[in-house]
Amino acid sequence: MIRVLIADDQEMVRMGFRMILESHDDIEVVADVPDGVSAVSKARELRPDVCLLDIRMPGLDGLEVTRQLAGPDVADPLKVVVVTTFDLDEYVYTALRNGASGFLLKDAGPALLIEAVRAAERGDALVSPQITVRLLKHFDGSSVKARPAPPSEPLTAREMDVVKEVARGLTNTEIGAELFLSLSTVKTHLASVQGKIGARNRVETAAWAWRNGVVS
């Protein structure tokens, strides 16, 4: 069971998300809250598997909530997916820099919402493909917190192949199909890469790849 917290200042949105999520047997909404302060409090209390956060909320906005729950200084970060109406580069940059493992537009539809929750829970990241390519091409040291480069030890050829596919926005399953690897092998390579480059998740791995010219 994937335990989800929803934070959005619009009651109708919270109700809609709850209905969509709870129509699936593997997802349970453990709380829905209308503001950022409540989101931080409830998330720390309940430790949900995934937090769905709107950006524009009273008290604390979703970007600050993301930083407090999943940021670089958080010892035991939660999985956060930002779901918003606003497709603005500055919002996406900040959300990912603050530790979000997904960024989704509210008009993406129920299927993508469910997939984003499941992806976050299993350690993948789902960012709308058009956003992924547009943004990651512009990642540099000024737009994202810099990560160690070069890596602590060289990446193998297969690890480099996996990194390139991550930077394209592919999920682990898609990478496995593309490279003829099992899902467990993809996860092993990705974990090794993240250890070598000091990345906490696949979004930072993709950003590292774009910054360091692994993809162009």
Image (cartoon, helix red, strand yellow):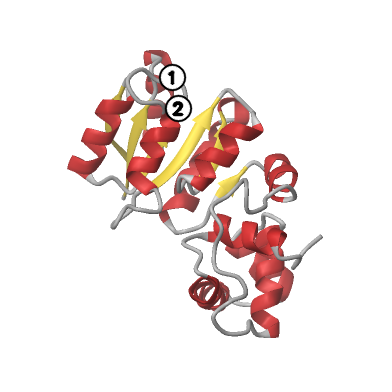
Q: Residue furthest right?
A: 216
61 w.r.t. 214: above or below:
above
109 w.r.t. 136: above or below:
above
Q: Which residue is mark 1?
A: 13
Tell me the amino acid under the disc marked 2.
Asp
Residue 163, position as x, y percentages in the image: 66, 69
Q: Dot 1: few (<14), some (14–19), or many (≥20) neighbours within 10 Å?
A: some
Work out whether residue 52 or residue 148 is closer to the camera in this orientation and state it: 148
Work out whether residue 78 or residue 22 is closer to the camera in this orientation and state it: 78
Residue at 36 percent across and 35 percent down: it is 65
Q: Quadrant of residue 106?
A: top right
Tell me, yes or no, whether the two marked residues, 2 and 1, touch with CB atoms within 8 Å.
yes
> For the residue labelled by badge 1, is the local secondary structure a helix, a strand or a loop?
helix
Asked if residue 155 lies left or right of residue 72, the reply is right
Residue at 29 percent across and 56 percent down: it is 76
139 w.r.t. 184: above or below:
above
Tell me the amino acid under the disc marked 1.
Val
66 w.r.t. 126: above or below:
above
Residue 123, position as x, y percentages in the image: 46, 59
